């Protein structure tokens, strides 16, 4: 009797990887030889036994599945129709029911044509709710979300447009609000993934930037320093697509030279721009052509002009009409085809698998999570969380103890200082007290001396008075004697 073992490995937080694993597993080519035995295995091995039912499943052997036990999968063909061939259909139906999310960022200097390009790309007139203030001290982001429907496919489109880019005198920090926004969206997604009760439909709440159109002016001589710095800051965070805007205002030769110059500068400065994928044979040819056209040189317009019997999106000039969707006039249709018709899903997937994955890995490492190299010590998420929590608790305790100790030391130091100050004050008090006593004693002596002087003075005064009284008595007697002598004479 044969036992069939099916084992599915799911990575907890990486939905796209999960999707790919499932796709690989579904991708087993089922065929049998004339004896009804299986001969075609996806790992390219036949097992060499006629009843040979044991093969290693796609990459899930002991060496490549991260140390799990090897297991064997026997390929069987059901004897009658079961119905799981409708799985892709079910998948598509579900996706159609839920709808899709696409977030596109447009960076470019004021008036370079950002709004017009987006409106032309989606053949819509998105109301501009921004105040369009161009005297802001900082670059700002204007975010608008729209629900679009084409046939029965719903698309929730968010357009993030820079406002005031290049308007500042000092442009050093112009890239910062953009990088901050992109990181914040990654962080929101990561936090949601890490929650115990995660949102049931993370993909529909995805606000990560899937594509970034970097609009360059058609004038000048290639990339300016603000372009180089901003693109370099963004190239590992977002799918960066440089575009030459308003390409109708430069000649064909000039445009070709400008494209070459921009491409050279991008290569020389090590800027990683998004390359349309060429590994899938279905899109290989078209994407190779698209890649050779970058940076796309586009014309955009809100206006419709009558050309022959048709109304076309275009720009009317005195000498003729530039048609937005005419491939001889600009790369606009190629851009739309590459971006929306062929590679929209790849842009979303690449955001998740490359840019978000990089952010996620860095953040998890910062948080203390890591893949243990020692397989005997493989930790579960809960264990890692618990050990991280313990480590943080210990760290907190250590810091609290440290703070307590430093507090005690500071108090002791303060006490010493206070004691010294107290002694100083005491000494000064004693000195002042001594000085006061001496002063008091001196004043007392002076008072006593003064009193003695007053007493002496009073004594002298009395003596003088007595002497004066005596003198006046003698004089009176003399006068009376004289008077009596006169009287006698008379
Ligand atoms: P802000 O949001 O104010 O920074 O401007 P923006 O970059 O969104 O530019 P917008 O789309 O508002 O276009 C500014 C002007 O450029 C408008 O007059 C457009 O008609 C014009 N314009 C847009 N695209 C093109 C183009 O491809 N060629 C030419 N010649 N003009 C264009
Ligand atoms: Mg605008």
Image (cartoon, rainbow, N blue to C red):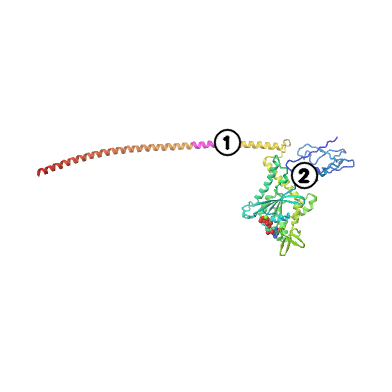
Q: Residue at x 30, y 37 (%)?
A: 452
Residue 387 in the image: state x and y as whole percent. Answer: 68, 36
Q: CA distance from mark 1 to mark 2?
A: 54 Å
- Mark 1 or mark 2, earlier in chain: 2
Residue 13 in the image: state x and y as whole percent. Answer: 73, 42
Q: Residue at x 23, y 38 (%)?
A: 463
Residue to which mark 2 is pinned: 20
Relative horizontal placement of residue 171, taking residue 278 as reference (left or right): left
Relative horizontal placement of residue 15, taking residue 46 as reference (left or right): left
The answer to the question of whether label 1 and label 2 lie on touching residues, with beta carbons closer than 8 A, is: no
Residue 250: which disc? none
Front-lying residue, 43 or 13: 13
Q: Quadrant of the N terminus?
A: top right
The chief SS type of the magenta part is: helix
Relative horizontal placement of residue 38, taking residue 379 as reference (left or right): right
Residue at the left extreme, as displayed: 489
Crowd around label 2: few <14 · some 14–19 · many ≥20 (10 Å): few
Image quadrant assignment for residue 454: top left
Foreground: disc 1 or disc 2: 2
Crowd around label 1: few <14 · some 14–19 · many ≥20 (10 Å): few
Residue 216 visible, this angle:
no
Residue 404: which disc? 1
* Count of marks, rendered view: 2
Please, what secondary structure does the residue beneath circle 2 have?
A: helix
Q: What is the magenta range?
A: 399-419
Image quarter for ligand 2 equals bottom right
Residue at the right extreme, as displayed: 34
Q: Quadrant of the C terminus?
A: top left
């Amino acid at each position: 009797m044969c036992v069939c073992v099916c084992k599915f490995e799911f990575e907890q937080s990486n939905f796209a990887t999960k999707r790919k694993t499932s796709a690989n597993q579904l991708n087993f080519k089922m065929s049998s030889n004339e004896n009804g035995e299986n001969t075609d295995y996806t790992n390219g091995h036949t097992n060499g036994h006629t009843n040979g039912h044991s093969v290693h499943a796609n990459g899930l052997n002991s060496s490549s599945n991260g140390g799990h036990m090897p297991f064997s999968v026997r390929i069987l063909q059901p004897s009658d129709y079961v119905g799981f061939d409708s799985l892709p259909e079910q998948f598509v139906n579900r996706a159609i029911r839920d709808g899709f999310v696409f977030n596109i960022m447009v960076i470019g200097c004021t008036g370079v044509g950002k709004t017009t390009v987006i409106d032309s790309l989606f053949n819509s007139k998105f109301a501009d709710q921004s105040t369009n203030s161009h005297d802001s001290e900082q670059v700002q982001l204007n975010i608008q979300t729209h629900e679009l429907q084409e046939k029965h496919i719903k698309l929730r489109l968010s357009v993030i447009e820079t406002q005031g880019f290049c308007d500042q005198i000092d442009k050093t920090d112009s890239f910062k609000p953009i990088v901050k926004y992109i990181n914040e969206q990654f962080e929101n997604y990561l936090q949601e993934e890490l929650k115990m009760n995660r949102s049931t439909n993370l993909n529909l709440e995805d606000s990560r930037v899937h594509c970034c159109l970097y609009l360059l002016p058609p004038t000048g001589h290639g990339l300016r320093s603000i372009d180089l710095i901003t693109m370099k800051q963004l190239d590992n965070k977002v799918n960066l697509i440089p575009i030459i805007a308003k390409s109708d205002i430069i000649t064909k030769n000039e445009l070709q030279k400008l494209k070459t110059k921009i491409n050279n500068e991008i290569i020389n400065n090590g800027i990683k721009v998004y390359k349309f994928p060429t590994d899938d044979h279905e899109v290989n040819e078209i994407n190779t052509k698209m890649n050779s056209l970058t940076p796309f040189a586009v014309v955009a317009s809100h206006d419709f002009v009558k050309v022959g019997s048709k109304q076309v999106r275009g720009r009317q000039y005195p000498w003729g009409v530039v048609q937005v969707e005419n491939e001889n006039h600009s790369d606009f249709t190629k851009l739309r085809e590459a971006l929306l018709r062929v590679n929209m899903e790849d842009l979303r997937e690449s955001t998740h698998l490359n840019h978000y994955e990089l952010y996620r890995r860095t953040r998890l490492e910062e948080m203390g999570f890591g893949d243990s190299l020692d397989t005997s010590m493989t930790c579960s998420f809960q264990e890692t969380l618990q050990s991280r929590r313990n480590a943080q608790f210990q760290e907190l305790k250590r810091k609290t103890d440290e703070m307590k100790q430093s507090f005690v030391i500071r108090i002791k130091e303060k006490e010493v200082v206070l004691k010294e100050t107290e002694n100083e004050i005491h000494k000064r008090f004693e000195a002042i007290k001594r000085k006061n006593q001496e002063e008091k004693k001196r004043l007392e002596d002076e008072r006593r001396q003064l009193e003695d002087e007053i007493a002496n003075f009073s004594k002298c005064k009395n003596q003088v008075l007595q002497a004066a009284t005596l003198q006046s008595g003698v004089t009176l007697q003399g006068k009376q004697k004289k008077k009596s002598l006169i009287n006698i004479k008379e």
